[in-house]
Amino acid sequence: IYYKSGWQDAFKSSRTKQDTFTAANGAKQKTEFMHRTESGSYRKGDGYTAAPRSLNYGRMVFVLPDEGVTPEALLSDGSAVDFFLSPESAESKYMTIDLSVPKFDVSADTDLSGALRALGVTDVFDAGKADFSPLTDKADAIFLSQAKHAARVTIDEEGVVAAAYTVMVACGAALPPDERVEFTLDRPFLFAVTGESGEILFAGIVNTPA
């Protein structure tokens, strides 16, 4: 999967300034924060606050855990995931948001072998049982030695670029709202990039922006 989209309303680089991000391990680091004041949906949920930003092709949703709440705890609860799917639900409010978002470049890779075996996909890893005859004339010599998924997401003032791959190794115009809120992502937070029809394309946790 390859995804690239600009923000509908880009951040101005003149407002980008260095500030402190507190990483998951408590370490503080200087990083560049993008700033923008805009009107939009904002939600105060149980243990988190959240807001979406519109992209030219979809949207990006940010979920900030409350102090003392980890992103992993939110994911186990499920309410944050619900916000990814319906960020403009009845529980959201239309507000003026002073948004501060760190520019980030995050990546991760996951070995899928264990998960596939747990689902019962085992023969493909066994040289004596693997059968790839529909794909090649040399099927007798082929089996999977590794299955891995990797993804990388970057954001800056212009927009979002994201890519993911799986490797199988074979051997509008509205009045400004009355309420205003600060939404500063200066500690570990969750994000999701959704497509134009709302499906989640990429999701992750930013424990440190770099």
Image: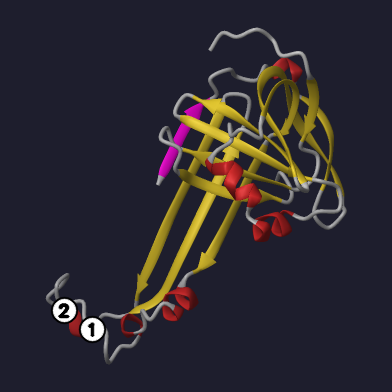
Circle number at residue 184: none
Cβ atoms under marks 1 and 2 closer than 8 Å: yes
147 lies above or below 53: below
Q: Main secondary structure of the magenta part?
A: strand
Give the structural element (helix, strand or loop) at label 1: helix
In the drawing, does residue 20 fall left or right of residue 151? right
At 55% from the left edge and 26% from the top edge, which residue is drawn? 54
Give the structural element (helix, strand or loop) at label 2: loop
Q: Amino acid at mark 1?
A: Ala
The segment highlighted magenta reads 2-6
In the drawing, does residue 171 fall left or right of residue 133? right
Query: Which residue appears farthest toward the bottom when viewing the image?
Result: 128
Circle number at residue 138: 2
Rendered image coloring scheme: secondary structure
Residue 77 placement (x, y as % from top left): 67, 58
In the drawing, does residue 77 fall left or right of residue 170? right
At 48% from the left edge and 29% from the top edge, which residue is drawn? 5
148 lies above or below 55: below
At 70% from the left edge and 45% from the top edge, which residue is drawn? 210
Residue 83 placement (x, y as % from top left): 60, 42
Instruction: Residue 65: say if magenta.
Output: no
Instruction: Residue 5: say if magenta.
Output: yes
- Toward which corner of the image does residue 100 lie, by quadrant? top right
At 66% from the left edge and 61% from the top edge, which residue is drawn? 76
Name the one closer to the observer, 203 or 31. Answer: 203
Circle number at residue 141: 1
Residue 35 placement (x, y as % from top left): 74, 23
In the drawing, does residue 54 fall left or right of residue 196? right
